[in-house]
Amino acid sequence: MKAEIISIGTELLLGHIVNTNAAFLSERLAGLGIDVYYQTTVGDNPLRLTKAIKEALKRSDIVIMSGGLGPTVDDVTIETLAKLAGKRLVLNKIILNDLKAYFKMKKVAFPEETIRQAYIPADTKWIRNMVGTAPGLIFEVKDKVIIALPGPPREMEPMFDKDVRAYLKKKIGASCSSFITRTIKIAGSAESQVNRIVMDLLEMKPPTTVGIYAKLGEVTLKIMSKYPDESRARAETARIEKIIRGRLGSSIFACDGETLESVVAKLLTSKGMTIAVAESCTGGLISNRITNVSGSSACFVMGLVAYANSIKEKLLGVKGDLIKKHGAVSEEVAQAMALGMRKLAGTDIAIGVTGIAGPTGGTKSKPVGLVYIALSSKNKTIVRECRFKGSREEIKHQASQVALDLVRKNV
Amino acid sequence: MKAEIISIGTELLLGHIVNTNAAFLSERLAGLGIDVYYQTTVGDNPLRLTKAIKEALKRSDIVIMSGGLGPTVDDVTIETLAKLAGKRLVLNKIILNDLKAYFKMKKVAFPEETIRQAYIPADTKWIRNMVGTAPGLIFEVKDKVIIALPGPPREMEPMFDKDVRAYLKKKIGASCSSFITRTIKIAGSAESQVNRIVMDLLEMKPPTTVGIYAKLGEVTLKIMSKYPDESRARAETARIEKIIRGRLGSSIFACDGETLESVVAKLLTSKGMTIAVAESCTGGLISNRITNVSGSSACFVMGLVAYANSIKEKLLGVKGDLIKKHGAVSEEVAQAMALGMRKLAGTDIAIGVTGIAGPTGGTKSKPVGLVYIALSSKNKTIVRECRFKGSREEIKHQASQVALDLVRKNV
């Protein structure tokens, strides 16, 4: 079974937005054992869109489109599809009611032009949009299928996972071979180090392969195995994972959809422990990441963004003399922040972070990217000195990564 | 002059990485006044790649490819291009010396397979890679041109900006027209509302057009003007901007690269005012956004993530009775948090945010997405009740957007 992806939007061709939909859809299709050989992007132009759809139907069994379903005259996907299928547009009352309910809930007057989104080609399957206004469409053309989804990822992604996935699973049925993937996330090691450790695995050939990908402060290994028999694919994936775990041990912090913050929140909660975070240069990022985890209120008590030195003194009890002697960016102040935070919040552990996120404010002895990260618990205090490279946000992110990993390894 | 982009890599078709190259190249080409009508992605497969190149050459004057130039047998771009052009591969000694110098500098033994990267088609222009190993290639085929660039963005981007841009500028020469864009960002209005207000502008035809884009909690209008004469393009862009400003007024918060947080930080700093932020459901996101702005320490004094009610009481002085009577998620508590924060930090203004970010914790009367956002200043206290939809992170983002916009409008 072959699929291809058509992304629609002049904003993509102008480079105004990055096409995350193509990656999302490709990844999901691979997970269903469906091969994707082409991704195409065209503008909101009926002629070129028609050509692209026709070309895709020649090559593939399934065409998944995203974009161009909005309420404005620029959005041409529906008209183009209707014309191609020789169907007229009819008003769908259920969709119209959904649209009205949507704007009522938003306490916004129903915008006249939105009614366009309730017109869909006659006798066409449609998918309810739980987040926005544009419904999705499923066209069955002989033995082929065209699926049109909204462009905004926050509408498209849940629509795929909730409805399209089930539809495709049913459609491909027995012809489906199983594609099992496993993502293994590693912190605290550079890509080249990990590369050296798993070199032989990276050279494996299908049906089971391993890929390496580096993000800021994180290296990912992806195991992929494709067999007609699902249990065989699972067994092969598990076998390789075991080898990787044997070599990389505790530097592996998470798998698949887990994040460092979700692992940390789960770990703390399972141990009945609480945490508080005192941040200077990371400016609230660590608190923000932990509180992105649903249920984090079970372990996260408070965060303090102590940007001004006076706040470090007043609320965290960091001595003014200490700041004067060692500077606000120092091992000593990071430790005092962590300790003061733990006392103020009454938590089991606390983090203190101070550093220079840049791009200005660096000196020769204390350059941009210098960050001290301390952890205080009942039994110990640990400090790490880090020297990061990159933009202000990249330095903040790397510091938050090290801080969270420090918690993971010390609770 | 028309160009199109071919991205090469099986990892793109598997959705393991997001294609930022296509966006980067499209944006750069638009800036040169070159139209892009198609972006195509294919795997490292000689047959499909050949087809894609042939198809692209039929439709466009310039084909820019990225990816598949690595040293492994999986990388087929060079062979495919050589075959297509009927040229044989020859060893280029300058490239070989570059490669040897590269690994010497890295203090790594020269990997045997890397020598492949020094073989390029006979009589072909090549571009030095200043960051990695794969050189870029420029094929001139009659009046058309194919440019092959490495896949990693950190190698591709500087190569484009340093060499390809100049090459293309020379090539398009007098036919080159100026493309001026202006991005206008709007908060506090739905896409459909903005759409209604600027409907006539959205229907404008080239050389000057206006596009509308919606992100979470933000609507963007993009003016694009393309004229042979740069000053004409600038004047047209400015004329349309003036019309848009006349209609949308203060709901416009920023232009081009500015963000809501950068505008807020600049505004506060220019007025010599200070701010502190007390967050419950947003969990540090507002502080994080403000502190992403370089120089924000001039206005940002502190942030408090008061997740536990005990912290709201102890540090912000929110009365326990108030929480008991109205609930932690209430207008009253948001106000008390803002007021308490302002007193504790001694700032000119303070923000208090409390709500239910979900996905759990909602009730019938207080559903997920209900957020109260308060601003306290010397003269007034304002509260907004908001009902957001979306995931936990989306609700947090929308709340931070409203909070920052509240500051922008009230200082």
Image: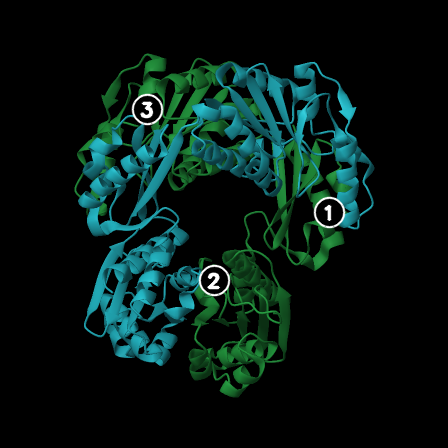
Chain colours: A green, B cyan
Numbered disc 1: what chain? A
Amino acid marked by disc 1:
Asn
Amino acid marked by disc 3:
Val
Which label number is shown at residue A76? 3
Is A300 rendered above or below residue A110? below
Q: Which residue lies at the image location 58% right of the left edge and 41% below the top edge?
A: B158
Numbered disc 2: what chain? A
Q: Position of residue A100 (x, y in %)?
A: 20, 38
Residue nearest the viewer, comparing B395 with B380: B380
Q: Give residue B298's quadrant in the image.
A: bottom left
Q: Which element is circle 3 on?
A: loop
Q: To which residue does mark 2 refer?
A: A285
Q: Position of residue A129 (x, y in %)?
A: 33, 36
- Of labels 1 and 3, earlier in sequence is 3
Q: To which residue does mark 1 refer?
A: A195
Residue nearest the viewer, comparing A374 with B148: B148
Which label number is shown at residue B68? none
Amino acid marked by disc 2:
Leu
The answer as to whether the residues below labels 1 and 3 share one chain is: yes
Kindly check if marks 2 and 1 are in contact, taking CB atoms under 8 A apart as contact: no
Q: Which element is circle 1 on?
A: helix
Numbered disc 3: what chain? A
Q: Which residue lies at the image location 22% right of the left edge and 75% below the top edge?
A: B378
In this rendering, position of residue B284 left or right of residue A176: left
Q: Position of residue A41 (x, y in %)?
A: 46, 27
Answer few, some or many: residues within 10 Å of disc 3's Cα (few below 14, many 20 plus, some between 14 and 19).
many
